[in-house]
Amino acid sequence: MNYINRWAGARYGSCRVKDRGDFASWCQAAVERVAIAEARTVPYFQVAATSYTVWWDHCAGRIPCRQQLDPVRFGAAVLPNLTLIEVVEDGDDYRWRLCGEHAAQVMGTGLAGRCLSEVEVEAGSGVLFRQALNDVVREQSPLFYVLRHRTVTGCRKRSYGVLLPLRDADDRPQTTAPVRYILGASDWTQGA
């Protein structure tokens, strides 16, 4: 069953009030991996697919450099949905270097400058999203995902996104350069 049928009508849900971001529920959100081919055909992945296309255009058979990506190429509609995450100590931790305005609003907090380990202490447990970040670092490839959770007010939320590996300009030009950053792009919805 594809994602359109599974979550048809998920764009607008039954929440009666505009629900603010809920950071605690985001920390415990379930993450489901989605095949690239399928994600590129589902309308909810529009922000992720646009970001993937910009990333892919810079690949040339290897992970692109963070410095190669021109923010203008993503377009004004996508930029507020982007996050840039630095890989710390080869994936022992992650630090948000950039958190777009829309991403911060939906999560209920700005994460720029914060480490995932700090977020986990604040949440009182591990953040399920860590495994997705670990997978991108280990596999050195993009990861499309659906993140699902329920806020404290009972609204169901979903994020349709992608995590894109990036290397640093200082890395030797090789196919297997380590992942130094992860570019995240997601579109948040409310719905059943």
Image (spheres, rainbow, N blue to C red):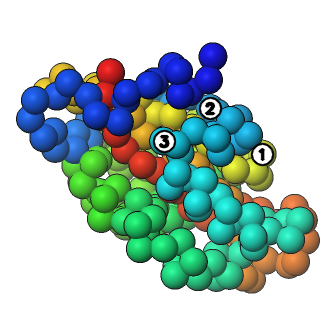
Look at mark 2 in the image and give the residue it sits on: 33
Q: Quadrant of the C terminus?
A: top left
**Which amino acid type is shown beneath numbered disc 1?**
Glu
Asked whether residue 128 is in view, the answer is: no
Q: Is there a contact, CB below 8 Å, between mark 3 and mark 1?
A: no
Tag 1 secondary structure? helix
Q: Which mark is residue 94?
A: none
Q: Which image quadrant is residue 14 in?
A: top left
Left or right of 62: which side holds 114? left
The residue under the point 42% across, 49% down is 187
Q: Residues within 10 Å of mark 2 (few under 14, many from 20)?
A: some
**Residue 101 sits above or below residue 41 on the image:** below
Tag 3 secondary structure? helix
**Residue 179 sits above or below residue 75 on the image:** above
Q: CA distance from mark 1 to mark 2?
A: 13 Å
Tag 2 secondary structure? strand
Q: Given this view, does label 1 or label 2 mark the residue nearer the observer?
A: 2
Near-viewer residue (59 or 119): 59
Look at mark 1 in the image and give the residue it sits on: 139
Q: Earlier in the sequence, mark 1 or mark 2?
A: 2
